[in-house]
Image (tube, rainbow, N blue to C red):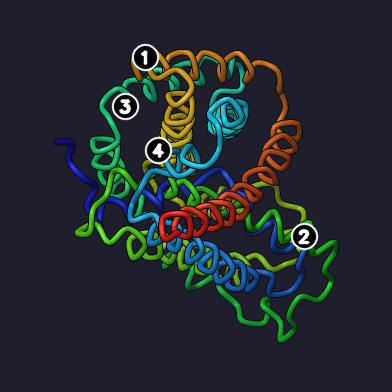
Amino acid sequence: MKEKLSQFHTAILIYMIQTGVYVFSIAQIEAQYFGTNGWLIVIPVSILICLNIYLIYWVYRLGKGQSIFEILEKSIPKFILVPFYLAFSMVWALIGCLVAKEYVLIFQMFAFPTTDPMVFKIAIDVLAFMLLTKGLYNISKASTVFFWCTIWMSLLLIYYTGEFRFERLTPYIFQDNSNMTEGFFHIYLAYMGYELCLLLFPYTDKKTKLFRAVIYGHLIRTVSYVLLGFVSFGVIGSDMLKVMLFPLLDLLAYIKLPFMERIENLFYGFFLFTTIITLVLYFWAAGESTQRVFPKIKINVHYFFIILFALGISYIPTVLNTIREWILYLGYIQIGFAYVVPGLLIILLLWQRRKKAA
């Protein structure tokens, strides 16, 4: 019998997968699209996501913990589902690969400007494959270790106490905004990853209390975004944030140590842990989907070809703007998945229940 995920490990897993590359630029997005006190926008977005998690909870409850693939296949012929399984797999693989590619390009820009970024990308993919072969339970334990390796960085916000000015926040909310609808989607994408809890049903039991764990992980991420935005607006100000590319890295550059220069490069390296977990979870999700299409092929072979496919695609975008555009378009699909699939599953479960009763 496979070991089930614990509540603590699941909460950390959700937090880590939501900690993508958006963390470096989220303050700039808040200032650009929402203007003064734009950091407040993460709160209503977080509440909306909690409602979506509640929708997913009803899938779990009505299906009594069944895999979403089993629920779908009980009502829809397999040959109809195959194209959708492959499409889901492709989207998840591309999101994981592009998140890692964006991280690599930023790292190369700041630390190794003369090195081919694909060297780092291949190294990350090798690490991801090694972790994938250990299974989801061990991935969750690795995620917890990586969590403790990075969460301490939140304490660095105390360093900016002397630089913080309330007058930089201003008494106004969302003034000087522009295209708030587009900005809303950008902020929403900074939280994406929680929807993969749909695939965790077979890996949990009653002791896991899956949705309590998902909410806890999501709320930790929300508090982190609120604190980061509050400090960024209070230290830098909304006008300056609008012209910064990566405000978090600029904040880290403020920290000076007598025995080390450009310490932000060291801090940036710690975010590799969160990037790897995000990458691994999306590749794992892609493998769960393709395994329904090719069940006789060993799962590690699925992971190998998924990573190989994603690596090949990652050679195409070579600049950050292109990668961000791709992530944005894939993110729209991801948001659609997070709402449409649970709604469809609830309809199918109610229909299956009614059919049994008849």
**Taking 179 as reference, is 136 above or below it?**
above
Label disc, if present, on residue 131 of the rendered structure: 3
Residue at 50 percent across and 48 percent down: it is 193
Callout 1 touching callout 4 (CB < 8 Å): no
Q: Which residue sits furthest left? A: 1
Looking at the rendered image, the disc whose residue lies closer to the viewer, 2 or 4, is 4
Image quadrant occupied by the C terminus? bottom left
**View extreme (bottom): residue:** 171
* Image x and y of residue 201, in percent: 35, 48
Q: Residue at x 17, y 40 (%)?
A: 3
Mark earlier in primary sequence (1, 2): 2
Q: Secondary structure at mark 4?
A: helix
**Left or right side of 144 for 82:** right
Residue type at tag 1: Lys
Q: Is residue 103 visible?
A: no
Closer to the N terminus: mark 2 or mark 3?
A: 2
Q: Residues within 10 Å of mark 3 (few under 14, many from 20)?
A: some
Q: Residues within 10 Å of mark 2 (few under 14, many from 20)?
A: many
Q: Earlier in the sequence, mark 1 or mark 4?
A: 4
CB contact under 8 Å: marks 2 and 4: no
Where residue 269 appears, as percent x and y from the top left, is 43, 36
Nearest the viewer among 352 and 273 is 352
Dot label at residue 32: 2
